Each structure stands twice: as structure tokens, then as C-alpha cells.
Image (spheres, rainbow, N blue to C red):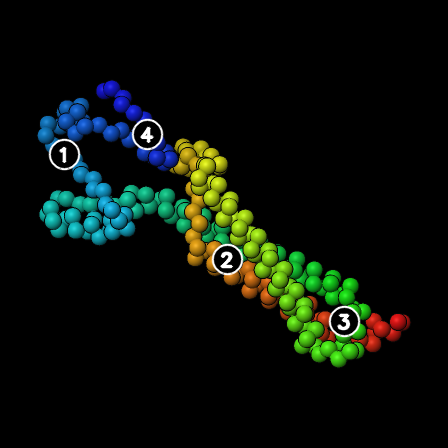
Amino acid sequence: FRVAGIFEIGMYEYDSSLALVSLSDAQKFLSMGQAVTGIELRLDDIFIAPNIREEIPQILGKGYYGRDWMQMNRNLFSALKLEKFAMFIILILIILVASFNIISTLIMNVIEKEREIAILKAMGATNRGIMSIFVLQGLIIGVIGTIIGVFGGVLVCYLISNYEIIKLPADVYYLSHLPAKVNMLDVITVAGSAIVISLISTIYPAYQASRLNPVEPLRYE
């Protein structure tokens, strides 16, 4: 055979063992005569492959069966699903750590602003008003952090996807580079969860600020 070209699809399993030759040359090389062992179909919509697979035996009769790309790459998809779940758990833990940072920041802010809080309460500010100030402060911190994180994450995914920055040993991971795809549902879910957790994290420090006795900070003023 004369090599006309070399292609690479990024999956080691195919790149290391797949060759495209004419049907007549393959039959002659394998001494198969006019026999054909299989036919591959290319679909405009890859997600209807399972339906087509089920129709093949009905059309061709007994002795024939179909396999779709999901079945052929089942192990890969299972590994990716497990990895996605693990990454989601890690992300939740990171958000929880960030929420504790928000709590500690607001508590320190309450301690530093005791005098100002006491003055506001002495001037007639309600507990609810004081509490809303610190809730709003924590919410602003959470929203700004979430926006920066979302834009940073989308940018990193774009760079990884388009420039193949992270290379992988193909014989180990079956992929030559780390794939990345931005799923808007995941982005919205994570961003929403981060904001909600940030909001919840503000409740305790804000409550402590609202319950502050104005007499103590102003006693020596």
C-alpha cells in the first residue's frame, strides 16, 4: 500500500489502529473475495444513532446487528461521567471554603465596625436595617467573586479547547489532549449555587451585628 495521508482524530484507540483503504484492496489483502464484514453509516444527527441501530436488524433480518458510537465508546463515557461528578464535588467543597472566608471576613468587619454600628443604632437604625447592610455586603462579595470566576473559567475552557494546551499521554487516557466544553446549564447551576451559599454565609455575621448592644462600644466615647 502507498500511504496517501495521515490523519489524527485525537483518540488513541483509533489513531493507533485505524487505516482507511479502498474496499477492493482490503478484500484482496484479507483474501475475502467479495465478502463484506460490516457497513458504517454517517448520520447528520449523531444522537439518533441508537434508534438507527435498533432498526438495522428489522430491515436486514436475522444474523445482522448494529452498534452505535455510544456503545463502542461506553468505557470512555463512563469515565468522563465519573470525572464530571468528582469535579462537581470538588467544586462544591471549594465554594464551601470560600463561604467560610466570607463568614470570617464579615465577622472581622463587624468587630472593626462596632463603633459605627453602635452610632447607627443610637441614631435609630433598626436591627433589620443593620442586618441588611451586612447581608448586602456579603452578597456583593459573593456576586463579584462569582462573576470573576465564571469569566475566568470560561476563558480557560476556551483556551484549552481551541489551543490544546494540556497534553495527555494518549496510551493511558485514550485522548491526546484534555477536551473542554462550556455547558451553560452547568455554568448557571454553579454560579447560582455560589451566590446562594454566599448569601447564606452572611446570615450569622449579619445577625451578630444586628444584636450588638450600642452601650458597650460607646461607653468610653
Question: Mark 3 or mark 1: which is in front?
Answer: 3
Mark 1–mark 2 CB contact (< 8 Å):
no
Q: Cα distance, mark 4 to mark 3?
A: 69 Å
Q: Amino acid at mark 1?
A: Val
**Residue position for label 3:** 117
Local SS, label 1: loop
Question: Mark 1 or mark 2: which is in front?
Answer: 2
Residue 61 drawn at (x, y percent): 10, 47
Q: Amino acid at mark 3?
A: Ile
**Residue position for label 2:** 190
Residue 44, placed above or below residue 35: below
Name the one closer to the observer, 211 or 157: 157
Number of residue marks: 4
Name the one closer to the observer, 131 or 61: 131
Q: Quadrant of residue 94?
A: bottom right
Q: Looking at the figure, which quarter contains the C terminus?
A: bottom right
Q: Quadrant of residue 184?
A: bottom left
Local SS, label 3: helix
**Residue position for label 1:** 36
Residue 151 visible in the picture: yes
Residue 113 drawn at (x, y percent): 77, 66
Identify the residue at horizontal 44%, vertical 39% (top origin).
162
Closer to the chain start, of discs 3 and 2, is 3
Closer to the chain start, of discs 4 and 3, is 4
Q: Cα distance, mark 1 to mark 4?
A: 24 Å
Closer to the chain start, of discs 3 and 1, is 1
**Residue position for label 4:** 7
Q: Quadrant of residue 105?
A: bottom right
Local SS, label 2: helix
Question: Mark 1 or mark 4: which is in front?
Answer: 4
Name the residue furthest right.
220
Q: Cα distance, mark 3 to mark 2?
A: 34 Å
